């Protein structure tokens, strides 16, 4: 029984991890295509800055948040705009939520986008931040990541891996069942074609060094660990009753964990929500506060701005969570 449960959870976590890898690859690829082509549009108006930053934030993963930090540190967007981005983003958890329950994920993204716009506007009314140097370096090698059929050892290795994932999706229980299996196979085929049109630079720097080395291992371990813990916890502990009795403390905990500039710990709220043990307002509050590790570059640039933005997001997360939890029941 234990071995069977561990095996099921492991295959489920692997499936989620691979789906996250596919979506991260697509996101990174699309971001690379548009790299440096939108900075000149940001001088049009502050509201355009809020809108653009929130759109970048809604993009699952950290690339949108990293882009906003770059724009902010180079004086191209305001403090309110980067707050809008960080409210709208929920880091790598967005990929996991999309793979588990896409409909809820899309509703959450819409709510975060709207909250980000409001938070950005109010922030610029309340705070006046000093302008920064307005320079933005564009690395030309980024544009070599697309539309190239040139073969390399790296590309051959990635193509073999892509074919292996397609085969595993067809012939094993990896990828789940029914419609979940169809989605897995479609994404794996799209991933194969993405590899064909990717350069050596994109494969090595963006996929291998960034996605695989920095993200996938941690995502799998956190997802597997929390799913396993949840699976056995419901058999011995009345988790649902405990959460119902302590929902306000849980709200404070969810917002506090969201302050950490890291994706892993926040996965527990996604897995509990997916297991129908956590109310949506708690997930919403955690998503408002947390931004994965999108804020880490800003921590290196300006600790003052880092803690100011985190404080604004924490206050908003508590407020939104408390109001929605009050009406949720």
Image: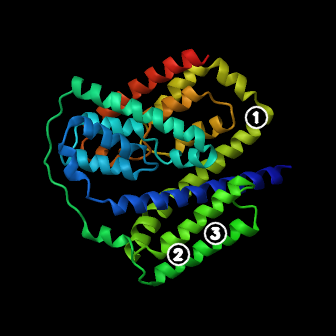
Q: Which residue is mark 1?
A: 234
- Can residue 267 be seen? yes
Task: Please say if 278 is above or below 210.
Answer: above
Q: Nearer the viewer, mark 1 or mark 3?
A: 3
Give residue 213's position: percent from left, percent from top. 48, 63
Q: State which tag comes first along the sequence, 2 or 3.
A: 2
Give residue 280's position: percent from left, percent from top. 58, 29
Residue drawn at point x = 42 percent, y = 63 percent: 29
Answer with left or right where residue 197 lies relative to residue 192.
Answer: left
Q: Which residue is mark 2?
A: 158
Label at residue 165: 3
Residue placed most toward the observer, 326 or 241: 326
Answer with left or right where residue 205 lies relative to residue 80.
Answer: right
Q: Are marks 2 and 3 in contact (CB under 8 Å)?
A: no
For the residue labelled by badge 2, is the local secondary structure a helix, a strand or a loop? Answer: helix
Q: CA distance from mark 1 to mark 2?
A: 40 Å
Answer with left or right where residue 241 lies relative to residue 156.
Answer: right
Give residue 285's position: percent from left, percent from top. 49, 29
Q: Are marks 1 and 2 in contact (CB under 8 Å)?
A: no
Task: Please say if 198 is above or below 240.
Answer: below
Q: CA distance from mark 1 to mark 3?
A: 32 Å
Q: State which tag comes first along the sequence, 1 or 3.
A: 3
- Extreme residue toward the right, this view: 1
Residue drawn at point x = 55 percent, y = 40 percent: 105
Q: State which tag comes first along the sequence, 1 or 2.
A: 2
Residue drawn at point x = 86 percent, y = 49 percent: 1
């Amino acid at each position: 029984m234990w071995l069977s449960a561990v095996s099921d959870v492991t295959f489920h976590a692997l499936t989620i991890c691979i789906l996250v890898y596919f979506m991260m690859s697509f996101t990174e690829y699309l971001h690379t295509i548009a790299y440096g082509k939108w900075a000149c549009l940001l001088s049009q108006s502050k509201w355009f800055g809020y809108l653009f930053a929130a759109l970048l934030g809604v993009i699952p993963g950290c690339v949108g948040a990293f882009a906003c930090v770059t724009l902010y540190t180079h004086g191209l967007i305001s403090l309110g705009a980067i707050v809008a981005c960080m409210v709208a983003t929920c880091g790598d958890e967005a990929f996991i939520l999309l793979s588990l329950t896409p409909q809820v994920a899309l509703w959450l993204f819409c709510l975060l986008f709207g909250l980000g716009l409001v938070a950005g506007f109010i922030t610029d009314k309340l705070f006046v931040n000093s302008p920064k140097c307005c320079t933005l370096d564009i690395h030309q090698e980024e544009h070599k990541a697309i539309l190239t059929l040139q073969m390399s050892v790296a590309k051959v290795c990635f193509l073999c891996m892509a074919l292996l994932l397609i085969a595993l999706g067809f012939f094993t229980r990896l990828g789940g069942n029914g419609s979940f299996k169809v989605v897995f196979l479609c994404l794996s085929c799209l991933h194969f074609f993405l590899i064909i049109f990717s350069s050596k630079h994109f494969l090595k720097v963006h996929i291998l060094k960034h996605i695989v080395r920095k993200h996938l291992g941690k995502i799998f371990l956190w997802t597997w660990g929390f799913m396993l813990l949840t699976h056995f916890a419901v058999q011995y502990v009345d988790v649902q009753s405990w959460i119902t009795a302590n929902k306000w403390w849980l709200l404070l905990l969810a917002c506090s964990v969201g302050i950490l500039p890291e994706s892993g710990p926040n996965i527990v709220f996604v897995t509990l929500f997916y297991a129908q043990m956590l109310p949506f307002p708690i997930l919403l509050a955690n998503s408002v506060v947390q931004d994965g590790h999108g804020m880490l570059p800003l921590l290196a640039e300006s600790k003052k701005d880092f803690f100011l933005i985190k404080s604004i997001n924490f206050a908003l997360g508590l407020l939104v969570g408390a109001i929605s939890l009050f009406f949720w029941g």
